[in-house]
Image (cartoon, rainbow, N blue to C red):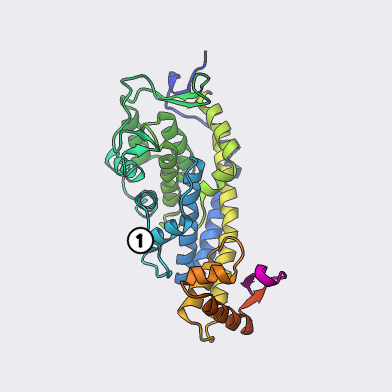
Amino acid sequence: MTHYIHELKEWPSFTWDRDRLAERLAAVRHMQGRLLGRMEALGFLPRQEAVLKTLTEDVLKSSEIEGENLDPAQVRSSIARRLGMDVGGLKAVDRNVEGVVEMMLDATRRYDQLLTAERLFAWHAALFPTGRSGMKRIRVGMWRDDSNGPMQVVSGPLGREYVHYEAPALDAEMAAFFDWFNGENETDWVVKAGLAHLWFVAVHPFEDGNGRIARAIADMALARSEQSSQRFYSMSAQIRQERDAYYEVLERTQKGTLDVTRWMEWFLSCLAGAIEGAQSTLAAVLFKTRFWEHVAGFPLNERQRLVLGRLLDGFEGKLTTSKWAKLAKCSHDTALRDIAALVEDGILVRGEQGGRSTSYELAKV
C-alpha cells in the first residue's frame, strides 16, 4: 500500500544531510551575490528593464507549468504598469493575467511581510477571479473542503485514473506551516525556500493553484535570502525546462521519508540553473541599452520607436512590412518608408530572402 510523507509519525519534521548540501548551497549563495553585484552596476533604468523581463518570464512560465499559456504582451504590460515603467504601447490586460501578476508582485515586493492565511486567500482569489478553474467552479479564497473525500492529485482518463498523491486532512497543517515560515530559526532562507515549496505542495490546501502559489512562496523566501525585492532570475522558467524531473522528484519525495536531501539537491541545482540563465537576460538588457544609446542621434518617429522596442523585447517570427504596418497601425506605404529610412541609417538590415518574403532585423551595435 502506498504511503505518503504526511502519514509518517514525525511529520512535518523534515531532515536533510547538511554536509551533502553544504557545497551546493555555498555555490548558489556565491552565484546570487555575483548576479546582484552585476545588476547593481547596471544603473537604475537597465536594472528596471531586467526586473521587467524576469518577472514577465516568471509569470509566463509558472502558468505554463500548469498548462496555461498567457499572452506575453499582456503580462509585460501589467507588470510595467505596476512598476511605473513607461514601455510604450501598453496592452489591455485580462483580469486573470492581472491576478497572476498581482500575486507574484505581492510575494516578491513585500517579501519581508508575514505570510498569513488572509494573504494566501487574496493570492488565490486573484488567480481565479471568475471563481472557476476552467469549466469547474471551485472554492476561491478559502481552504479546500474534504467533505467528499481527501484531496487527490490524479492523471489519466476517466476510469483509469492514476493517483500521484493524496493530501492530508487540513486540521492544523497550515497553522504549523505559518509558524515555521514566519518564525525565527537558523535555517538558511535558500534552504527554507526549497522546504517551503515542498511543504506547501504536500499540504495542498487549495482546490487548485497550489503549484503556482508554492512557487510564489519560494520566490518570496528567495527574495528574503537576498534582502531584495528586485528579481533577476526566474525559478519558474528553470522548473519549466525541467518539468518532468520536477514532477518525478516531487512525487518520489511525497512518497518517501522525511529525509528530503534529494529534493533539496534538486532544488539547489535548479536554482543554480535559474541564476545561470539570468545571464541571457543581462545580455539582452545590455544590448538594449547599447542600442538606444547608438540610435539616440537619429530622428526616429513614434512608429519607429514602437516597433524597434518590440524587436528588442523579443519579437516572435520575422519582421515584414505587413507586420510593421499592423504593429504601428499605419498603411503599407508608410511602413515601407519607415523601414527604408532605418535600413539607410544602418539600424535595420534586410534578410537574405527578397520579394514578398523580405524581412528585417536589428543591426548589430
Q: Image quadrant for the C terminus?
A: bottom right
Q: Residue at x 53, y 28 (%)?
A: 251
| Residue 277 quadrant | bottom right
134 with respect to 267 (left or right): left
Q: Nearer the viewer, residue 191 or 56?
A: 56
Q: Position of residue 50 (x, y in %)?
A: 49, 63
Q: Amino acid at mark 1?
A: Arg
Above or below, comparing residue 237 to residue 297 in the picture:
above
- Where in the figure is residue 301, as x and y percent of width and height? 48, 82
Magenta part of the protein: which range?
351-365
Q: Which residue is at 37% across, 60% downward?
A: 92
Task: Give the farthest residue toward the right.
Answer: 352
Quick check: is 227 in the magenta stretch? no
Residue at 42% in and 27% down: 12
- Nearest the eye: 123 or 272: 123
Callout 1 crowding tier (Cα within 10 Å): few <14, some 14–19, many ≥20: few
Residue at (59% x, 68% y) in the render: 319
Q: Residue 86 vs residue 278: left or right?
A: left
Q: In this rendering, does residue 187 appear at all? A: no
Task: Indicate the position of residue 345 as horizontal and vertical percent values.
Answer: 61, 84
- 28 is higher (above) or lower (below) than 151: below
**Disc 1 element:** helix
- In the image, 123: left or right of 202? left
- Residue 56 placement (x, y as % from top left): 47, 56
**Viewer-closest of 319 and 299:** 319
Q: Is residue 353 magenta?
A: yes
From this viewpoint, is residue 222 visible?
yes
Q: Main secondary structure of the magenta part?
A: loop
The residue that label 1 is drawn on is 82
